[in-house]
Image (cartoon, rainbow, N blue to C red):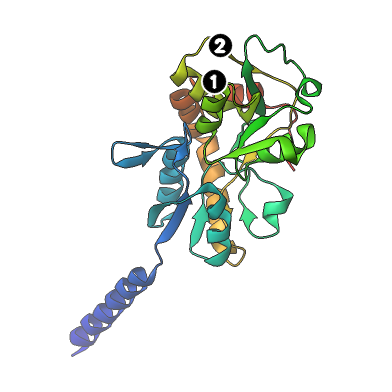
Amino acid sequence: MKKFVALFAALVLALSMTAALAEEPVIIVATNPEYPPFEYVEGDAIVGYDIDLFAAIAEKAGINYEIKSMDFDAVTSAVAADENTIGLSGISITEERKLNVNFTDGYINAGLIVIVKADSGYTTTDDLKGKLIGVQLGTTSDFAAEEITGPENVMQYKTFLNAVMDLQGNKIDAVIIDKPVGQAIMASLNDPELIMVDMGLQADWYGIEVNKNNVELLDKFNVALDELEAEGFMDQLALKYFGGGAEEAADEAAVEEVPAE
């Protein structure tokens, strides 16, 4: 009889644990896969720096997740509306976004640079005043461009690539862009008429957006990021996607060692 009771208790415990696991929510990873090398489509899959990073985070945090593609300017709203949705899309940590979502610690510093025509003669932000500047809608480059040339001269695009293609077509005068993304686009286009210019724009720390009601998930992510950094995983990612160490990539991109605002 005692054995039967013990077996029954063990069975009940096992069923309870199984039910608890089944109730664990699937985390939706909201991303805009038009932002190489951080997230982009390759074949039928969404791949990139951020995707590899989150796979490692999810393994350490013990969570199940599903990647959902959407426009970049819809990501933050999706996170704010659902505590089981997170935003991972090369998202800059800004005070404005912090009003609606929480951010993990910054995981890479991708400072802003400017792409111009090689014969333009543009070397400083003063040269861009009153010029047409292309940006991706809703990014920190969008805000930076407004300060330089005024909102009436900012041309907003769905993707940075579309902006650079209009620069090639002489429809705009410059593109403000995150440096790693600009490097990837420049390498892909291999256009000798385009150059990247460092005009001393702000640093741009990327973080993962988490719903304000899900502090437990935020803590798990930060612990995982610390462990991955200590294990050298971030250096491996930098080598894979940027051809250098994480510190080197950050140093090249950074203008100042603080998050963009």
Residue pointed to by mark 1: 168
Image height of 134 relative to 19, above or below: above
Relative to the observer, which residue lies in front, 248 or 179? 179
Image height of 191 relative to 78, above or below: above
Q: What residue do we see at 64% from left, 36% from top?
A: 155
The residue at the far right in this view is 126
Q: Could you tell whether 54 is left or right of 136 in the image?
A: left
| Helix, strand or loop status at disc 2 | loop
Q: What residue do we see at 28% from left, 74% from top?
A: 14
Q: CA distance from mark 1 to mark 2?
A: 8 Å
Local crowd size for mark 2, using a 10 Å CA cut-off: few (<14), some (14–19), many (≥20): few
Image height of 5 relative to 231, above or below: below
Image coordinates of residue 181 in percent, x first then y, are 54, 29
Relative to the observer, which residue lies in front, 203 or 222? 203
Q: Could you tell whether 72 is left or right of 198 in the image?
A: left
State which quarter of the image contains the N terminus: bottom left
Local crowd size for mark 1, using a 10 Å CA cut-off: few (<14), some (14–19), many (≥20): some
- Mark sitting on residue 193: 2
Observer able to see residue 259: no
Which one is earlier in the sequence, the residue at label 1 or at label 2?
1
Q: Could you tell whether 33 is left or right of 11 in the image?
A: right
Callout 1 touching callout 2 (CB < 8 Å) = yes
